[in-house]
Amino acid sequence: MAEALWKTLDAEATEHSALWAAVASVCNGLRVEVGQPGSSLHKRIGVLYTCVGERLTMALHTRVKRALAMVSSHYLGIDVLVVSEGYVIGDDEDEAREEVQKLANAAEVPRDALANFFDTKIMLPLNPPKPEKTGP
């Protein structure tokens, strides 16, 4: 019985060490400062989670800013400040549903044109033909 407990304890310790090494490797790769070298695994994962979330948020903001810059440079008369505020729909559920339907109807023709353009001009086929084998 004692031998089985020691084996279980040894397996858990090995798994914990592997997890610790993986988290340390990710933290080092992302240059995340965790604080003290003896920080708990739980604290390191929490700091890593926060850091990754912040980086993803910054990346999203950067992409949105680039998209707005491109729109403002290609279309005259666009008020980027108004566009960046978003589209606000009223609180009444029926009016909101009606407004969303109007927007969907207005976007239908351009949406279909863009979809057709991307499907025929840019997108790769889902099942590309396999290259023929040559040689022996």
Image: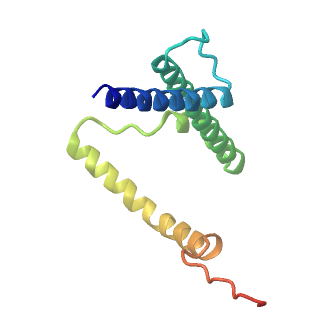
Q: Which of the 4 quarters of the picture holds residue 59?
A: top right
On screen, residue 15 above or below 41: below
The quadrant the N terminus occupies is top left
What kind of colouring is applied to the model shown?
rainbow
Residue 60 in the image, given as x and y percentages of width and height? 58, 37
Residue 32 place in picture, x, y as percent: 63, 22
Quadrant of image for the C terminus: bottom right
Q: How many marks?
A: 0
Along the horizontal axis of the image, is 122 left or right of 134? left
Q: Residue furthest top?
A: 36
Residue sitting at x 54%, y 25% = 48
In the visual, does 15 lie left or right of 78?
A: left
Residue 79 appears in the rendering: no
Q: Is residue 48 visible?
A: yes
Residue 7 higher or lower than 96, as above or below: above
- Up the image or down, 76 lies above or below 54; here it is below
Please name the residue shown 59% across and 34% down the image.
61
Of residue 129 and residue 35, the one placed in the foreground of this image is 35
Question: Residue at left 60%, top 40%?
Answer: 64
- Closer to the camera, 62 or 136? 136
Residue 122 placement (x, y as % from top left): 64, 70
Q: Is residue 101 left or right of residue 113?
A: left
Q: Which image quadrant for residue 63?
A: top right
Image point 61% across, 43% down: which residue?
A: 78
Residue sitting nearer the eye, 45 or 3: 3
The spot of residue 33 in percent (x, y) is 64, 17
